[in-house]
């Protein structure tokens, strides 16, 4: 049952929440005893990824390139966006689990989970469930005392099942980069998590090839690992492992003078007439009220009018794109908020890191997460608008709170580093910034964790 419990933890993470007709109860996953499960030969994760890609591709080939899924009375015409490799799993002998993002013709993105049977090269899908539509879950999972899992409507789920750990959290966080082939010289910049009033960071392990040093971004209080690399470092890992103790973050006082940049434009977060007019529209009759009340009106406006979608030109934190399309991921949500807030005189700033799953104790993490803060009534107020948009039951919580289960990598936008990339200031820093012979490049990056509470 060990494998099955691990699988249940994976799907509980946040990728199963809207069942198609015929989806069966997870009690069926408890048939094999733990002793037998340990002897089951595992199919390689790469085989599962190849199997689900082949299945979707083959099915789409006969339907003008679209993978067809029936959702109640609708027939969805979907195209593969990505496979969530961090959630691929073996369930038992020749039984596997995969989670993918599929976009339909209108741009809506579905998180779809597949149960598969068979050996590498001959896998068939036996069951399909859809967890999210544009990032919003339709239900979650809860573990029973007998270690099996059952679906739970979001309205009945606790804050912990919806991603929130209150109070304190402790975990080991693994940041790993695999360097690509380097022909010539390369330079890389990686954010380094640092201790502050809300997180205690201890770097317990590091494996860093090539020449390297820590450089300071004093304007934003960031530490950045700078690597000078040659062809000899091709394919090598860069690994940093942290012990993290994190406190839930609420409104807090800061005696530091408010920096002018928290009211000014940045490259992708402009301040001006367009965003002022939008902010005033959101504020409505609250023009004479406090900045706290006005910030809440802007927060509510974005939750009500934006759609969480990892589709199109998202992920840059472009306020204009967010304003035009009313879509994006956490970067667009918070960039739009910052542009609107600054445009009516409310200081606001940007931070980025990773959210740690609340409903399991180890495993992969689905990329970065970002958030914002604004200044009002003598305090900095944390907000997480994209999470408030996903979980409407927590929209009040996320105005003024950040849960304990996250790690912050860096703060600010348009980071000026020395030495810095030839491309100029860095938009924001979560993943590494890599240049090979002065040209931008990409290095495979993965995050994982183990809770140590």
Image (cartoon, rainbow, N blue to C red):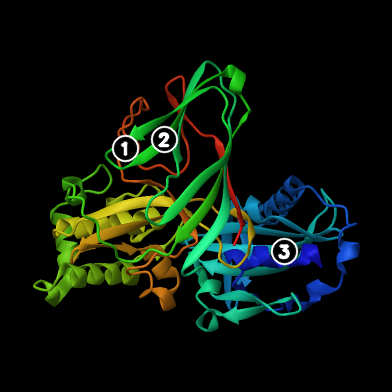
The answer to the question of whether label 1 and label 3 lie on touching residues, with beta carbons closer than 8 A, is no
Q: Residues within 10 Å of mark 3 (few under 14, many from 20)?
A: many
* Comes first in the chain, label 2 or label 1: 2
Q: Which residue is the extreme one toward the top?
A: 184
Tell me the residue at 10%/71% (across/down): 287
In the rendered view, does 118 fall on the left or right side of 212? right
Tell me the residue at 14%/62% (across/down): 277
Q: Is residue 155 above or below residue 368?
A: below
* Comes first in the chain, label 2 or label 3: 3
Q: Which residue is mark 3?
A: 7
Between label 2 and label 3, give the one nearer the viewer.
Answer: 2
Whole-angstrom CA distance, mark 2 to mark 3, is 36 Å
- The answer to whether residue 282 is seen in the rendering is no
Point out residue 268 in the picture as x, y percentages from the top left corner: 28, 45
Q: Is residue 24 above or below residue 407?
A: below
Q: Residues within 10 Å of mark 1 (few under 14, many from 20)?
A: many
Tell me the residue at 54%/34% (across/down): 443
- SS at mark 3? helix
Q: Which residue is mark 1?
A: 415
Point out residue 161 in the picture as x, y percentages from the top left corner: 55, 73
Whole-angstrom CA distance, mark 2 to mark 1, is 11 Å
Q: Which mark is residue 391?
A: none
* Comes first in the chain, label 1 or label 3: 3
Q: Which residue is mark 2?
A: 224
- SS at mark 2? strand
- The answer to whether residue 149 is seen in the rendering is yes
The answer to the question of whether label 2 and label 1 lie on touching residues, with beta carbons closer than 8 A, is yes
Q: Residues within 10 Å of mark 2 (few under 14, many from 20)?
A: many
Point out residue 440 in the picture as x, y percentages from the top left corner: 44, 29
Whole-angstrom CA distance, mark 1 to mark 3, is 40 Å
């Amino acid at each position: 049952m060990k494998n099955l419990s691990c699988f249940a933890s994976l799907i509980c993470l946040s990728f199963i929440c809207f069942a198609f007709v015929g989806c069966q109860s997870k009690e069926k996953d408890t048939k094999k005893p733990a002793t037998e499960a340990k002897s089951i030969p595992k199919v390689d994760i790469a085989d599962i990824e190849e199997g689900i890609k082949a299945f979707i591709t083959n099915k789409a080939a006969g339907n003008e390139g679209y993978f067809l899924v029936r959702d109640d009375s609708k027939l969805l015409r979907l195209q593969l966006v990505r496979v969530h490799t961090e959630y691929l799993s073996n369930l038992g002998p020749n039984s596997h689990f995969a989670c993918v993002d599929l976009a339909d013709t209108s741009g809506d993105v579905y998180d779809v989970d597949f149960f598969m049977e068979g050996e590498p090269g001959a896998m068939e899908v036996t069951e399909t469930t859809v967890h999210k539509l544009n990032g919003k879950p339709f239900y979650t999972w809860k573990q029973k005392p007998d270690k099996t899992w059952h679906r739970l409507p979001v309205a009945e789920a606790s804050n912990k099942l919806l991603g929130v750990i209150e109070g304190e959290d402790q975990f080991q966080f693994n940041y790993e980069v695999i360097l690509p082939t380097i022909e010539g010289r390369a330079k890389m910049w990686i954010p380094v998590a640092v201790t502050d009033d809300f997180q205690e960071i201890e770097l317990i392990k590091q494996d860093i090839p090539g020449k390297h040093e820590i450089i300071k971004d004093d304007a934003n209080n960031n530490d950045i690992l700078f690597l000078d690399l040659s062809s000899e470092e091709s394919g090598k890992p860069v690994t940093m492992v942290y012990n993290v103790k994190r406190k839930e973050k609420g409104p807090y006082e800061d005696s530091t003078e408010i920096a002018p940049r928290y009211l000014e434009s940045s490259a992708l977060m402009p301040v001006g007439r367009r965003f002022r007019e939008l902010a005033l529209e959101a504020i409505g009759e609250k023009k004479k009220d406090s900045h706290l009340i006005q910030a809440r009106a802007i927060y509510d406006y974005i939750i009500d009018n934006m759609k969480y979608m990892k589709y199109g030109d998202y992920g840059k934190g472009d306020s204009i794109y967010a304003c035009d399309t009313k879509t994006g991921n956490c970067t667009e949500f918070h960039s739009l908020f910052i542009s609107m807030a600054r445009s009516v005189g409310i200081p606001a700033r940007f931070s980025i890191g990773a959210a740690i799953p609340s409903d399991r104790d180890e495993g992969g993490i689905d990329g970065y997460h970002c958030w914002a803060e604004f200044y009002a009534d003598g305090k900095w107020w944390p907000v997480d608008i994209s999470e408030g948009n996903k979980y409407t039951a927590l929209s009040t919580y996320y105005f003024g709170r950040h849960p304990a289960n996250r790690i912050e990598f860096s703060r600010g936008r348009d980071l000026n580093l020395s030495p810095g990339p030839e491309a100029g200031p860095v938009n924001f820093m979560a993943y590494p910034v890599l240049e090979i012979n002065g040209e931008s490049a990409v290095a495979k990056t993965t995050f994982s964790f183990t809770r140590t509470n």
